[in-house]
Image (spheres, helix red, strand yellow):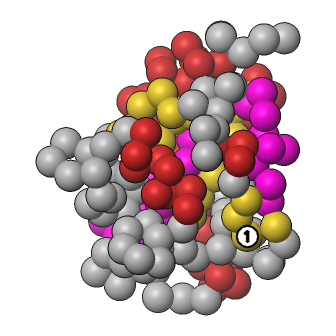
Amino acid sequence: MSAIYDFTAEHMDSTSQAFSDCEGKVLLIVNTASKCGFTPQFEGLEALYQQYKEQGLVVIGFPCNQFGSQDPGSNDEIGAFCQKNYGVSFPMMAKVDVNGKDAHPIFEWLKKQKGGLLTDGIKWNFTKFLIDSKGQVIDRYAPTTKPESIKTDIEQALSAVSP
């Protein structure tokens, strides 16, 4: 697999998403959780999506329950929580594992493209990956990195998109 476009994933409603449908867009992929200290980042992620979606940004959330069991609900419960509490309108995928033998192939690929500081594995919820309009990983951001602090990187990626 050489680009994000080679993958598919399942939405919360069980429909399939071919990432080839996102070709030419800038993506921000985030593993999320509903009961985490970083959960308020949903607000910042939604703000980025609203600000830049017309220019080609797509924020995509992947709920994950691997860190402190902080997303134990069903896909329906997680989706309702995100919508009700943070007004999330960006695509939310079905719950996945991001590490281990059952890790979703997208996260296996993302980790190979941009390893972490001490380990390539995902260390916690709200690790973020910025992908350019050609499907390649630009950067990886720690869970502590607030969404608004990556605006400059998003703007640079969007400015490189061919009209």
How packed mark 1 is, by other alpha carbons closer than 10 Å (few <14, some 14-19, many 20 or more), is some
The residue located at (79%, 78%) in the rendering is 14
Return the residue at label 1: 10
Q: Report whether residue 144 is seen.
A: no
User: x and y percent of residue 66 in the render?
Assistant: 37, 78
Image quadrant assignment for residue 61: bottom right
Q: Is residue 149 above or below residue 11?
A: above
The residue located at (56%, 56%) in the rendering is 106
Horizontal placement of 34 versus 141: left or right?
A: right
User: x and y percent of residue 98 in the render?
Assistant: 44, 66
On-image quarter of the C terminus: top right
- Queried whether the magenta region covers residue 39, the answer comes back as yes
The residue located at (48%, 21%) in the rendering is 153
Q: Nearer the viewer, residue 80 or 110?
A: 110
Numbered range of the magenta stretch: 17-41
User: x and y percent of residue 160 in the render?
Assistant: 65, 11
